[in-house]
Amino acid sequence: MTIGELAARFGLPAHVLRHWESVGLLAPARHESGHRRYGQADVRRVAMIQMGKEAGLGLGALRQLLSTPDPMDHTDLLTAHVEALDQRIAQARAAKELIEHALACPLSFDDCPHARERIDAHIPGTTSG
């Protein structure tokens, strides 16, 4: 299939596929006229790239993961990404708890001891208490 057909299949602009090719994520075959030709392996590769991006992986990490037949050859990279995701999840939970408390607290933000404690914790050199 052509670059336009593959791009349309995934709802992507063709320039995204060209960019992925330029960074080493895709290597389509070339027709004798020089036009890119994509096969089923390329379709699966685009799906894997999209899945990796949805998981929060950058193009460099994806290139490394897809550099071998089995992405599980890079457990160190995947383990580091899981640790980063765990940190982001913890930060998101803390943010959610703060916002839920602010919504439920009957006191103004300035009068709320919980809010003051959280604010003080973000000021360098300040100790809570």
Image (cartoon, rainbow, N blue to C red):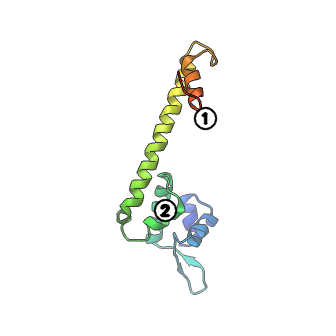
Q: CA distance from mark 2 to mark 1?
A: 34 Å
Side of 103 relative to 42 (left or right): right
Residue at image position (52%, 71%) is 26
Query: Considering depth in this image, is 127 or 25 the residue closer to the camera?
Result: 127
The residue carrying mark 1 is: 124
Q: Residue furthest top?
A: 106
Q: Quadrant of residue 48?
A: bottom left
Q: Position of residue 55 (x, y in %)?
A: 47, 52
Q: Amino acid at mark 1?
A: Pro
Secondary structure at numbered mark 2: helix
How many marks are shown on the rendered structure? 2
Q: Is residue 46 visible?
A: no
Query: Considering depth in this image, is 55 or 38 the residue closer to the camera?
Result: 55
Q: Residue furthest bottom?
A: 32
The residue carrying mark 2 is: 61
Side of 15 relative to 41 (left or right): right
Query: Considering depth in this image, is 88 or 21 the residue closer to the camera?
Result: 88
Between disc 2 and disc 1, whose residue precedes? 2
Please identify, in this view, whether the residue under mark 2 or under mark 1 is nearer the observer: 1
- Label disc, if present, on residue 41 of the rendered structure: none
**Crowd around label 2: few <14 · some 14–19 · many ≥20 (10 Å):** some
Q: Is residue 18 visible?
A: yes
Residue at image position (56%, 67%) is 20
